[in-house]
Image (cartoon, rainbow, N blue to C red):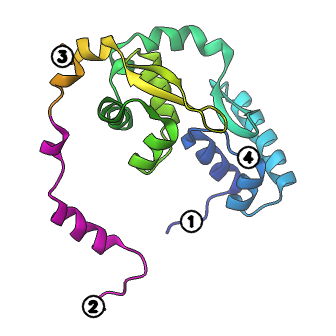
Amino acid sequence: MGSVMSPLAALEAILFVTEAPVPTSELAEVLEVTPEEVERLIEELNANLEARDSGLVARSTAGGWRLYSRPEAYPYLERFSSSATARRLSSAALEVLAVVAYKQPVSRTQIAEIRGVDSDSAIRSLLRLGLIEEAGRLSLPGNPAVYRTTPLFLEKLGLGSLAELPPLADHVPPAEVVGALEETFRPGVAEGA
């Protein structure tokens, strides 16, 4: 590992990559500083962003901190959102779209369990692009939404119906291969034991 990064630079990197607001307490733990120091670092980060006329600002929402674009950038972001680059789907969005297509209706939690990572940003992108939509709510605490693909999804793939999706079994390794992989990555099994 190279030189140690300053807590301020590390804070900026964390807020840059997060897909959801990060609580002050979590930032304090990761940066190994007090919550008060996190608040001071965020003030310093915002002062630095403003001093260099950045298009970003660190804001607290939903119980945590995250980088957001400044309101003055919105006209440029609107123009960008209709560009070819913005319309290209990320690999995360493609994975989420595949999960929704084959498992629908499916909740955010189920998507995250299948992918092994938080998928909120990809879900928001797919909703914004009109490729998935809310299909109702589950009768569970919090009434989580479930998602399904849209007619636009079928149109973009050139399909008449979901029945025309290729069978998922064509893309899944045989059970013995999956079993061998699971054995390899099972925690607590000593090598050669």
Label 1 and label 3: CA atoms lie apart by: 53 Å
Crowding at dot 4, Cα within 10 Å, few <14 / some 14-19 / many 20+, comes out as some
For the point 67% across and 15% down, the residue is 71
Sequence-first disc among 4 and 3 = 4
Range of the magenta residues?
167-191
Mark 2 or 4, which is nearer the eye? 2
**Residue picked out by circle 2:** 192
Q: Nearer the viewer, residue 133 or 74?
A: 133
Q: Could you say whether the residue bearing mark 2 is in a helix, strand or loop?
A: loop
Label 4 and label 3: CA atoms lie apart by: 43 Å
Q: Nearer the viewer, residue 116 or 40?
A: 116
Query: Which quadrant of the figure has residue 5?
Result: bottom right
Find residue 154 and report its horizontal and vertical position in percent. Answer: 25, 16
Q: Nearer the viewer, residue 142 or 58?
A: 142
Label 2 and label 4: CA atoms lie apart by: 42 Å
Identify whether 125 is placed above or below 2: above
Q: Which mark is residue 3?
A: 1
Identify whether 176 is placed above or below 88: below
Find residue 13 and report its horizontal and vertical position in percent. Answer: 59, 46
Q: Which mark is residue 159?
A: 3
Mark 3 or 2, which is nearer the eye? 3
For the point 49% across and 29% down, the residue is 146
Find residue 150 and report its horizontal and vertical position in percent. Answer: 36, 15
